[in-house]
Every structure is written in structure tokens, then in C-alpha cells.
Image (cartoon, rainbow, N blue to C red):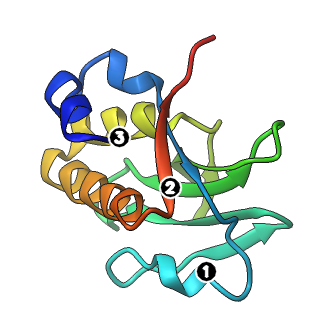
Amino acid sequence: MSEDDKAALKLGDSKFAEMMLFLKTPINQQNHRDYKFGDSELRELQGGIWAMPAYLEDDDPYSLFFLFTTIDSGEMVVAFAEGTRQDKQLKLGQPLTTGAGLNSLFAQQEKRAQRVLKFLNDISRADEAEWHQIVD
């Protein structure tokens, strides 16, 4: 997001939920290691869908995962999905826009949400992605 956008939109704002980060180059086997968050690395769940934890703690029922996925337009975006534990397995929920996922995390863990936003803004500043507002 540009500096002007940052002043207008903040984590937790309802309008922030409409923001989506679009990657300029899709994630693949050659570049997926370039997108590590902390100690987490992207893993391919199925063709064209990559995931890694944005927030996952053993003692917290809430969890959130990055989803790098291709949308109907053919573009790759950074979305999120909340995780639920079922019989010691994690199941991912419905995809959320980048902003909606960050807002969800912000409601649970403010500092982690700020770290995740910084990670995504670093990708954008490196000219590898662009923020866009999604309108229904």
C-alpha cells in the first residue's frame, strides 16, 4: 500500500477487509522459498495453492494461514484462511481477502497482525506485489 493508503486504512478498519494483495509473479517450485515468514515456509497443498502459518500456537485454538492462490482472473493473490483443529488435524476454512484475514488476526493478536502486514508490505515494496481494493 502506498503511504497515502496507509494513512487512510488501518488494521481493523472495515474498509481494510476489502484489500487484496496481488502478486506480480506466481509462486512456484523455484521461488516459493523466497516467501518465508519467520521459520515457516510455503508448502504446496495442490497445484497452484500454497500455504504457510501466519499464526499457529499449540495453546491457542485460533490459527490463521497465508494462502497464495490463483483466482478466476488467472492472477495470484495472497489470501488467508482460518484453521480449525479436528482430531489432531488442521482444517482450513474458506479463503478470506488479504485485508479480512489481517483484520481477523488483528482482533486476536495485534502484534502478530502488524508483523504479517509488514511482511506483506515488504513484498509490495520490493515491487513483487500490488495492493488493490476488491469491490463486489
Read off the residue under disc 3: 102
The quadrant of the picture occupied by the C terminus is top right
Instruction: Tell me the residue at 19%/51% (across/down).
Output: 114
- Give the image location of residue 8, x and y in percent: 19, 22
Q: Look at the numbered disc 1 and give the secondary structure of its residue.
A: helix
Label 2 or label 1, whichever lies nearer to me, is 2
Disc 1 residue type (three-letter): His
Neighbourhood count class around disc 1 (C-alpha, 10 Å): few under 14, some 14–19, many 20 upward:
some
Instruction: Kindly identify the amino acid type of the residue bearing the numbered disc 2.
Output: Ala
Give the residue number, with chain letter if any, for mark 2. Answer: 129
Of labels 2 and 1, earlier in sequence is 1
- Residue 26 appears at what percent x and percent y? 70, 65
User: Nearer the viewer's eye, disc 3 or disc 1?
Assistant: 1
> Mark 2 to mark 1: distance in Å?
14 Å
**Residue 5 location, quadrant:** top left
Circle 1 sits on which residue? Answer: 32
* Among the two numbered marks 3 and 1 on one chain, the one whose residue lies closer to the N terminus: 1
Within 10 Å of disc 3 (Cα), the crowding (few <14, some 14-19, many 20+) is: many
Q: Is residue 57 above or below residue 23?
A: below
